[in-house]
Structures are given as structure tokens and as C-alpha cells.
Image: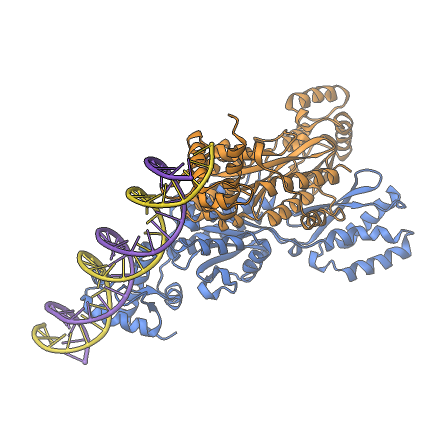
Chain colours: A blue, B orange, C yellow, D purple
DNA sequence: GTTAGCACTCTCGCCCTTAGAGTGCTAATC
DNA sequence: GATTAGCACTCTAAGGGCGAGAGTGCTAAC
């Protein structure tokens, strides 16, 4: 990224923030009138022509003003923008939404966080539910439902509770079942879920066979309940907010975007892209790999429990996004969320 | 509803089915050319003028053809329409989607049903998850998670599994906890969930106090886990299908409809309206109470386990809906679903 | 009762025009 | 040499006029 003269920077910033707030191309007169510039519109015109040539600005048509290019936005986010403070009001809404009482389950806190983020940014938010595989095994129980079916309950250190109905092998007595479960609990305690692989299970199985006369089938329980499609939920909030943006007046665009919103797996991939970053990640336009959001900006951050990443949340809007405000908001929310989850 | 002459009925049917398939106003020439009519366009014009006066047809403007009014659609659905057979192909897709293996949990079957319905009708489907309150208590367990928290698992006769993390009263020993749980299981077995009221709980509490020295707090467990906001999930499928309809070219209309789609509670109310009907219910336009779907038709049916209604599913589309095909499809799907759930 | 014929109405798409905004270039100015 | 005033030029968006096309309602004939 070439260095821009002080003056070009000021003009670029002026065009971008103008465009962000009005959604209209910004002309040289408008920039010239901005206080702190002190140059005539003719000078501005020359500078703007330069900035266009350098790729920071675009002209929708000859007699329109300029709008930022993706490169322009990127420069703005990296060098020019001065992050606004999170307002007292927003801060209050966030801590209100994340009030701890009655929120024992991680999922609920996450949902509430996404809702408030969408409300205060007026954008669409995506949030990935806690990822099961990233947790550690805590305990497993089997509750018999009737003579042939049982409920497996699996609990992780991150408070994730997973249950599944399974067929119980007829030949297994309750006492034997109990023994198997105890053995597994003891062996697996604290192990990261993604390390509970089929090969580990096989190993345990061999070990157990030696010490305990138990049926092959008994082991299918654990395997079956873990192997389960690891389908992480993605929650959406404020999807209609994006329809208020002038960028989305076109029904075909809307159709494409909302079709994406229906594909949980694709949304997961989109969020997954920025997992494991420590900071807030901003993806502008074509920096997004998924083609249906190449005209959007996605601002994401990961939430954690005790330094361990659980999932990702993001704000989706047009590239003409209020970066000054949204980036600090996402940072503030995630910090707050991590503090709450980690105690 | 007045009686219509045989001829008027034929003309009305012709206009309606024409409009349903083309989304264009139908003119007298088009009707006259339809085989089986055998009248000149002039005669048709007279009859159509009558039908308009009687309220069955509308004219968008003087020189356009006619389109059906809500009254027209209603007459069509009640008297004229001849339900198409469900095609072999559709039947196959339905039974494919509802294949029983690996679908032990009701929720999964329901979801799969909604998905296939949306796919074969090319419309949006709404489906209410099984209603917890309509099930009967089967058993309750408490799993200690650590020294101060436990997991309550509640299982109903309809296979509904509900769990919730609660604080365990410190003063309660594991043995005592076990006793309480056993007592409750025994007393509540088979009781409809909506009869497990606070007053019943209080009664049990008094009874138990007499026989067992146990702390007040112990009872909060059950109460807390039942009193929980009874929030039934509504699942949506194929929401973008509705955007293919020419009726939804207007962004404001789309915004309104999708805003509704985000309000689970409102969707629940909409479906709840037709719960407990034995047959397929068709609500045309303003017959819907919710104002955001007054330009739509909603076709619903209830699904059941062993004759007990669990929830409602529906197809939502413009009033210009392919009634001939969708109504039999909904009926077929629900029948199939009920058979599967009931074994 | 039915139909052919015809004048009439309304929409839709097209073209043209005009107003307005903003540019780029040139020549004058600091 | 940098800045600015001035001006011709370009492009869009909005509005009006016009003709084609579709479909009607009415009348008079069958």
C-alpha cells in the first residue's frame, strides 16, 4: 500500500465517511466545504482524480461524485479511521443483554449477545453456536428410557450438553451398562472432544474386553453418539436490517443473500474462515471467499471460555458499513462476553 | 354464498386456473378459446361482468382481463377445484424424506418433513415443533454436574427430551435427591405436562414434607424446569421461494414478510390459529388474522402421535397458489407423517 | 340468447427533452 | 509551482408525449 500525502488522506477520509453516512457519491464541492479542508473544489478535483487513478476511489459515471473502492475502504480501516468510543447507552444495552442470571447455558448467552449486537448496529448478525469439538469431555451418562432404548447424555467442560436416543443392546444388563459408563467417564475425563476418535475408542474397547466380559455392541453407544454429524448451529439476527440499505433494493440480490441465510453449512464456513484470530477481523467485499457476500463487509470476532475459542460471531452489512462504530462495538461485546463466559 | 350457474362456474374456474398458472389477468378471448367452453368472447364478457359484480372477479384496470378476488378463490377451493392426485414422484420424495431409520427424535422427522414439502411445492413452509405441553410426563432424572449444579432431564411420552442446568441446594444429599426424584417420577408418570401446574407441585410438596425430611429448595428444581418459558420453536423452509413469485417484487413487502419470519412468537400464533382441526385448513388473504400475510394464503394441517395433536405445519404462498396441487400434497404428507410418528 | 363489430380506455415501453450535478481542462492568480 | 475561477462538457434521473397492444362495453344483427 503506497503512502498517501497527508492531504490525500484527509480527502479520502472525507469522501469515505461522507459516503458511509449518505450512500450518495461525494463531489468535490462537498469535500471543499468540509471544515478543516480549506482548499477549493478545483484542487480537490485534481486530488480526487489522483486517488481514483491510484485505485482508492471510483466514479459511478462521469458526472457523479466519487465513491470508495474496496482498496479505499481497506486503507480507511487500516490507517485513517478513528474508532469511536462505545457510547454509554450501547454499553448499558450490552451489559443488560448479558446479565448473568438465568443464563447458565452458553447457548443462551450467545443468542442474547447476537440479538443485542444486531439491535444496536442495525445490521445483520451471524453467530456460531459453541463448537462441540472444541470442548473437553466431562462426563457421560446413560438413562434407560424403556426396555430397549436409552438416552445418552454427554457433558463437556464448556457446559455443552448433548443428548441422543440410542438403542440399547438387549444383552446388556443394567449393571454392566453402569460399569461401562463408569469406565468411560474415568478414561475420557478432560479429554478434548476432537481427540475422542474412533481409534481411541477401539483401544479402550480392547482394554475393556480384557477386564470385563461385555458385548461388542455396548461400545457402539459412545461411538454412535459422538460420530453424529457435527453440525454446529449458526444463528441469525436482524436479517431484515440489511433490506433497509439502499444497496439492497434489487430483488435478485435479496434472493441470493437470503438463500445463503438458509444454508447453515455455508454460514458456518464463512464464520469458520476467521476463527482463531485474536482480534476483530474485517473482511471487505471480495476479501470474503463466499461469492454471495462479495458486496458486503463482514466483521467478526471469536468468543472464548478461559482463553479457549468456542465460536465466532459477526456483523454483516454492505461494504458501506459504519466501521467507526461497528468495530469498537464488536470488540466491546466480545470482551464482555468472554468475561462472562469465563467465570 | 349464492349459487352460480353451471356456465358461470366453468368460466370462473377457467379464469382462476388461468391466473394461477400465468399470474396475468385473464381476458375473455383466452376463456373463449379454452376447450370445453364453446361460447364467443362477447358472451364470456357478459358473464365476466356479472361475476365481477357478484364479487368473484376483479379488474386491475379497465382494459385488463379479470383476476380472482378472495371470494373467488374461496369459491374455487370450496366447490370448483378438483384436487390433483399426488404424483408418483412426489410420493416417492415424501417417503424418502420420512424414512424412519436414524430418526428417533420427533424434531428431526418434523424438520425433514418441512424441507421436503418446501422443495416439492416451491413455497415457503412453516412448521411448529412438537408442543411440549401437549405431551405427558414420563420420567425425570437429575444428573449432578459438579458440587453445586445439576442437569435435570425430563422425558415425555412423545419422545420429547428437555434438559436444563439448575443450582442444586447445597443442603441436599445425593440420597435425598434420589428419593425426591423417585417420588416425583412415581407421582407424575403419564400426566399431561400442562397439568403439572404449580398448584399440583405444591400439593406434592406438602405430601412429601410429611413423609420425608427435605428442604424447601429441593422442590424448586421441578418447578423451575417446568415453568420455563414455554417457547415452541417454529422452523422455516424455502423462505426465498416466495421471492420468485411476481407478487413479491416490492422490497417493502419483502421486508415486512421477512421481518415476520424473524418473529418466532408471531409465527407460532399464526400456526396456532388452526391447531386442532382434523382436516387441512386453507386461509385465503384476509382470512388470516395476522396483517403481514393478508396477501398470502396459508394451508395448514396438524400432525399427531397416536391421535394426539403435537403441532401444526403449513405452506405459505401468494393467494395465487396452486391449490389443486398443494392441498393434496399437504394432506398426503401429514398422513404419512402421522403414520410414522405413531408407531 | 348469442355473437360480430367497433369505438373506447388503459397500460407499457419508447423516445425525447430538460434540469441538475459534477467533472476535466485551461488560463489566470498567488 | 501550486492553487483557483471559469466554462464547456457529460451523464443521469425525471417527466411528458406517443403509439402499439390488449381488452373492454355497447349496439345491432342473427
Residue furthest out toward the right:
A213
Name the residue rendered at 76%, 25% in the picture.
Answer: B187
Name the residue rendered at 68%, 25% in the picture.
Answer: B196
- Direction from residue B279 to residue A46 in the image, left or right: left
Name the residue rendered at 85%, 39% in the picture.
Answer: A147
Q: Is residue B122 visible?
A: yes
Residue B26's spot in the image, x, y percent?
A: 46, 44
Q: Is residue B149 visible?
A: no
- Direction from residue A10 to residue B83 in the image, left or right: right
- Tell me which corner region of the image, top left, top right, bottom left or bottom right, holds residue A247: bottom left
Residue B269's spot in the image, x, y percent?
A: 54, 33
Residue C30's spot in the image, x, y percent?
A: 9, 72
Residue D29's spot in the image, x, y percent?
A: 37, 39
- Direction from residue B253 to residue A54 in the image, left or right: left
Residue nearer the viewer, B83 or D15: B83
Give the vertical position of B93 relative to B226 (above or below). below
Give the vertical position of B14 relative to D3 (above or below). above
Name the residue rendered at 62%, 34% in the picture.
Answer: B280
Residue nearer the viewer, C9 or B89: C9
Residue nearer the viewer, B195 or A117: B195
- Direction from residue A208 to residue D10 in the image, left or right: left
Numbered-mark total: 0
- Tell me which corner region of the image, top left, top right, bottom left or bottom right, holds residue A103: top right
**Considering the image in quadrants, where does the C terminus of chain B appear?**
top right
Residue nearer the viewer, A157 or B135: B135
Amino acid at each position: 500500500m503506497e503512502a498517501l500525502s497527508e492531504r490525500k488522506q484527509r480527502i479520502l477520509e472525507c469522501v469515505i465517511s461522507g459516503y458511509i453516512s449518505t450512500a450518495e457519491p461525494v463531489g468535490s464541492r462537498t469535500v471543499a466545504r468540509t471544515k478543516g479542508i480549506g482548499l477549493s473544489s478545483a484542487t480537490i478535483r485534481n486530488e480526487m482524480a489522483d486517488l481514483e487513478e491510484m485505485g482508492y476511489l471510483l466514479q459511478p459515471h462521469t458526472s457523479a461524485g466519487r465513491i470508495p473502492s474496496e482498496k479505499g475502504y481497506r486503507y480507511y480501516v487500516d490507517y485513517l479511521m478513528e474508532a469511536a468510543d462505545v457510547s454509554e447507552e450501547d454499553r448499558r444495552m450490552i451489559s443488560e443483554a448479558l446479565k448473568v442470571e438465568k443464563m447458565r447455558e452458553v447457548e443462551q448467552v450467545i443468542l442474547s449477545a447476537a440479538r443485542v449486537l444486531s439491535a444496536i448496529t442495525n445490521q445483520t448478525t451471524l453467530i456460531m453456536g459453541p463448537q462441540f469439538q472444541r470442548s473437553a469431555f466431562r462426563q457421560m451418562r446413560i438413562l434407560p428410557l424403556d426396555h430397549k432404548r436409552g438416552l445418552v447424555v454427554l457433558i463437556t467442560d464448556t457446559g455443552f450438553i448433548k443428548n441422543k436416543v440410542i438403542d440399547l443392546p438387549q444383552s446388556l444388563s443394567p449393571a454392566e451398562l453402569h460399569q461401562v459408563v463408569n469406565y468411560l467417564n474415568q478414561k475420557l475425563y478432560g479429554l478434548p472432544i476432537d481427540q475422542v476418535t474412533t481409534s481411541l475408542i477401539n483401544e479402550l474397547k480392547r482394554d475393556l474386553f480384557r477386564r470385563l466380559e461385555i458385548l461388542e455392541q455396548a461400545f457402539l453407544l459412545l461411538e454412535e453418539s459422538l460420530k453424529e454429524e457435527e453440525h454446529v448451529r449458526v444463528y441469525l439476527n436482524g436479517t431484515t436490517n440489511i433490506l433497509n440499505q439502499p444497496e439492497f433494493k434489487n430483488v435478485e440480490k435479496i434472493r441470493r443473500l437470503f438463500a445463503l441465510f438458509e444454508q447453515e453449512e455455508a454460514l458456518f464456513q464463512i464464520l469458520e474462515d476467521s476463527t482463531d484470530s485474536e482480534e476483530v477481523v474485517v473482511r471487505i467485499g471480495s476479501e470474503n471467499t463466499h461469492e454471495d457476500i462479495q458486496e458486503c463487509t463482514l466483521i467478526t470476532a471469536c468468543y472464548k471460555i478461559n482463553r479457549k475459542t468456542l465460536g465466532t460471531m459477526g456483523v454483516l452489512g454492505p461494504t458501506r458499513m459504519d466501521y467507526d462504530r461497528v468495530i469498537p462495538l464488536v470488540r466491546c461485546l466480545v470482551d464482555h462476553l468472554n468475561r462472562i463466559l469465563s467465570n
